[in-house]
Image: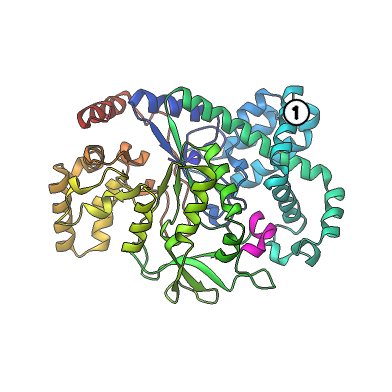
């Protein structure tokens, strides 16, 4: 469950009290891992996978209640958030409200924050400024200066990072630059506190590293030489995947592609820094689109769909060797879904990385054998890209198949789960727990037995995604007891 889906009073799930209560709930159930989506600032279509930075934290996740207690915001300023819905995230209404409030917090931080917090902020800046923080702060300032237009549309001196132009803006907008850095400090201060609390409760955090960067991101602006971009700052080809289960046209993500030869030239230092940073935020890391390391789908930027792409070789062993040499055996999980070839499996297995098995994709087949799911994998009922298990079984299968075929598939599912249509969400969770997989994960919506209206994301679409929120009181003592029993029966407790 992503953090934005937590309950709370300020329009979006955040790093506040509800996050701590969620950790307490997981611990009381006997669960040991909380997986969430990328935590960077969101941009296009509010997607966590289209972030303006691979390092920065999403300011929307900052807990305003803690800032109120510290005297950085007032009750009067928080009153505007009372009109926001609590059962979903209204990004259109939330973003301007919270962005404007946090800008004021950043401006008043140096005068209003306690001395100890100001000192901690200075240490944070000293640690991260040369690596990513200063570039990100400049990027945000220049986005504001250019009315949020993409960096390829900025004045040439800024878009091309002409040193004199950057020195001028650093001086003219010094206060704004420092404000952005203060906001990032507040995010990471709250993040570390939550991570420490989860560790004390025996809960490991599982993060998510998207393989690609967004075109309109601080990293694409600061390091265009690492990407296939034209002189105009726009990509010639873009990332995506060919037609698959989710979309007949494939998925045209639009991200710029890496110049892997240039990454290899310096031993993949940009990636080593990125993974090192991610490993400080989470105990386990899902490496998104792992198959792109073996071969990736390149789509002409002029194409409207991903149908017209081609496979190109990825960095493969050179990339993973560099990571292992620099960082040791990292707790990575390979997201190996989609069109997986023997070459992708061989690359994953060569580095002993656990892959992913999604039961929604497997139990509909007559020849499914749960005992064949290997130990070195993570077994899911579904992921953030799937419908909820209840919605998939009762609504999704009917939409994918003719009535007779849908009934046949449903019959296969019930036979493999040894369950019932009314409890299919719980039966799939039991099945995931019963497999040999080292780790079994289910979305919160499946624990609750929610239907398609609670779906978080529909791949290939941009409207209405990422909005679902858990409601206070939905997790009952009876549900906690059921999870405890299911864990005990499966031997996972």
Expressed as whole percent of the image width and height from the top left, the position of residue 482 reads: 26, 28
Q: Is residue 400 magenta?
A: no
Magenta-colored span: 218-226
Which quarter of the figure has residue 97? top right
Looking at the image, residue 205 sits to the left or right of residue 392; the answer is right
Quadrant showing the N terminus: top left
Query: Which residue in the rendered view is the most extreme toward the front?
Result: 325
Q: Residue at x 47, y 49 (%)?
A: 466
Which quarter of the figure has residue 348? bottom left
Look at the numbered disc 1 and give the secondary structure of its residue.
helix
Q: Residue at x 45, y 58 (%)?
A: 317
Looking at the image, residue 354 sits to the left or right of residue 224; the answer is left
Which quarter of the figure has residue 437? top left
Residue 339 is at least partly visible in this image:
no
Q: Residue at x 55, y 55 (%)?
A: 50
Q: Residue at x 70, y 62 (%)?
A: 151
Expressed as whole percent of the image width and height from the top left, the position of residue 21 reads: 46, 25
Residue placed most toward the observer, 457 or 270: 270
Residue placed most toward the observer, 172 or 298: 298
Looking at the image, residue 361 sits to the left or right of residue 177; the answer is left
Does 23 appear above or below 409? above
Q: Which residue in the protein does label 1 denote? A: 118
Q: Is residue 221 magenta?
A: yes
Looking at the image, residue 475 sits to the left or right of residue 49; the answer is left
Residue placed most toward the observer, 417 or 60: 417
Residue 369 is at least partly visible in this image:
yes
Quadrant showing the C terminus: top left
Does 211 appear above or below 373? below
Does 452 appear above or below 346? above
Expressed as whole percent of the image width and height from the top left, the position of residue 56 reads: 62, 45
Q: Main secondary structure of the magenta part?
A: helix
């Amino acid at each position: 469950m992503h953090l934005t889906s937590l309950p709370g009073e300020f329009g979006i799930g955040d790093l506040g009290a509800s996050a701590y209560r969620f950790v307490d709930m997981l611990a009381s159930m006997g669960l040991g891992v909380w997986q969430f989506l990328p935590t960077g600032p969101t941009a296009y279509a509010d997607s966590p996978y289209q972030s303006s930075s691979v390092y920065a934290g999403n300011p929307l996740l900052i807990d305003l209640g803690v800032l109120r207690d510290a005297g950085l915001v007032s009750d009067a300023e928080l009153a505007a958030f009372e009109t926001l819905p609590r059962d979903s995230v209204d990004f259109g209404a939330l973003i301007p409200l919270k962005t404007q409030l946090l800008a004021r917090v950043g401006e008043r931080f140096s005068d209003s924050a306690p001395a100890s917090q100001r000192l901690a902020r200075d240490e944070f800046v000293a640690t991260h400024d040369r690596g990513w923080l200063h570039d990100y702060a400049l990027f945000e300032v220049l986005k504001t200066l250019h009315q949020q237009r993409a960096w390829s549309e900025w004045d040439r001196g800024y878009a091309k990072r002409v040193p004199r132009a950057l020195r001028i803006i650093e001086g003219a907008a010094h206060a704004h630059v420092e404000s952005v850095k203060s906001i990032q400090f507040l995010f990471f201060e709250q993040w570390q506190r939550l991570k420490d609390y989860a560790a004390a409760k025996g809960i490991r955090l599982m993060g998510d590293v998207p393989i690609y960067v967004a075109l309109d991101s601080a990293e694409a602006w600061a390091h265009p030489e690492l990407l296939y971009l034209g002189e105009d700052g726009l990509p010639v080809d873009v990332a995506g995947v060919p037609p698959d289960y989710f979309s007949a046209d494939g998925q045209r993500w639009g991200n710029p592609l890496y110049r892997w030869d240039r990454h290899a030239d310096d031993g993949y230092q940009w990636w080593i820094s990125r993974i090192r940073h991610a490993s400080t935020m989470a105990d386990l890391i899902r490496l998104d689109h792992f198959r792109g390391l073996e071969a990736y789908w390149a789509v002409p930027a002029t194409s409207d769909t991903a149908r017209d792409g081609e496979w190109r070789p990825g960095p493969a062993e050179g990339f993973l060797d560099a990571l292992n040499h620099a960082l040791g055996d990292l707790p990575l999980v390979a997201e190996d879904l989609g069109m997986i070839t023997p070459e992708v499996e061989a690359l994953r297995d060569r580095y002993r990385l656990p892959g992913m098995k999604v039961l929604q994709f497997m139990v509909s087949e007559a020849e499914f054998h749960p005992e064949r799911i290997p130990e070195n994998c993570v077994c899911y009922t579904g992921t953030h890209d799937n419908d909820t298990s209840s919605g998939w079984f009762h609504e999704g299968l009917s939409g994918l198949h003719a009535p007779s075929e849908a009934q046949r598939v449903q019959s296969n599912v019930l036979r493999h789960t040894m369950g019932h249509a009314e409890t299919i969400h719980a039966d799939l969770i039991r099945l995931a727990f019963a497999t040999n997989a080292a780790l079994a994960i289910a979305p919160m919506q499946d624990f609750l037995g929610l239907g398609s209206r609670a779906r978080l994301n529909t791949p290939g679409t941009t409207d209405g995604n990422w909005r679902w929120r858990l409601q206070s009181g939905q997790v009952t003592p009876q549900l906690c007891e059921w999870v405890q029993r299911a864990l005990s029966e499966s031997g996972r407790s």
